[in-house]
Amino acid sequence: MNPILRTPESLDWITLLIFGSLIFVIIAKSLYYVRFLNFMVLPFNNKYIFMYNKKERLVHRFHVLFTIFQVINTALFLFFVNKHLLASGAGDSPYLFPLVLIGIFLFLLIKTVLQLANGSIFGSQSTISEIIFKKTSYLNYGGILFFMANLLLAYVTISPTVVIFITIFLFLGINIIGWVLVLKNYQNFIANYFFYFILYLCTLEIAPLVIIGSLLK
């Protein structure tokens, strides 16, 4: 029997990313323990939204730390999606993950700036800021799902397709809950700015998803 040489894929950089991102959660938990506990039950209890939807909500250190955690794990999850589902051949490129990471960061940054600018134009900056905080809170919670999925995809021998689709399903479910609550809580505001809301929905919510879907294809 001849020995077979196997060259396992290096997980060094993935390990550094996964556990490096966890540092942001540990810092957030250490500095804001009560807030962390409320955040962890966000999909089941929106107490977190009502307690912390205050001044400087978007630039609060807890929110920023979880946003960084979410961006890193979202980029890594998309890297795994490309590797296991799309099979585009770009998965071996050393530039793929940095490009995805930078793309997600710029996308969220530009989108937030445009939303705040629109709110300023229509004289509703405070309300728009509240809506952004609520949506990004649910988005940041999705980072926890991506983190757990990344652990499974990197270290556990299990069908990656199953892990990816279950994660996407749960992520969409959590963010749909967030959207429903936003629509419910701001229905009077939406009614007063219905044309603006439709324009916002098409340009800043639907259009980016269509563009991303086209790029993935």
Image (cartoon, rainbow, N blue to C red):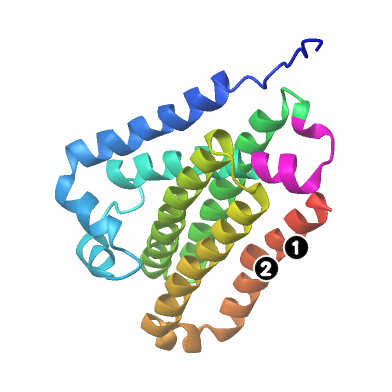
The residue at 50%/70% (across/down) is 173
**Horizontal placement of 47 versus 42: left or right?**
left
The amino acid type of the residue labelled 1 equals Val
* Crowd rating for badge 1 (residues with CA inside 10 Å; few <14, some 14–19, many 20+): few
Q: CA distance from mark 2 to mark 1?
A: 6 Å
Residue span colored magenta: 79-91
Question: Residue 53 at x, y = what percent?
Answer: 27, 62
Residue behind mark 2:
206
Residue 171 magenta: no
* Crowd rating for badge 2 (residues with CA inside 10 Å; few <14, some 14–19, many 20+): few
Please state, as top left, top right, bottom left or bottom right, where the N terminus lies in the image.
top right
Residue behind mark 1:
210
Residue 2: image quadrant is: top right
Question: Residue 95 at x, y = what percent?
Answer: 72, 25
The amino acid type of the residue labelled 2 equals Ile
Question: Residue 178 at x, y = what percent?
Answer: 43, 70
State the mark number for residue 32.
none
* Residue contact between numbered discs 2 and 1, judged by CB atoms under 8 Å: yes
Question: Residue 68 at x, y = what percent?
Answer: 44, 39
The residue at 42%/45% (across/down) is 67
Front residue of this view, candidates 132 and 210: 210
Can residue 175 be seen by looking at this rendering? yes
The local secondary structure at tag 2 comes to helix
The local secondary structure at tag 1 comes to helix
Q: Does 110 sit above or below residue 75?
A: below
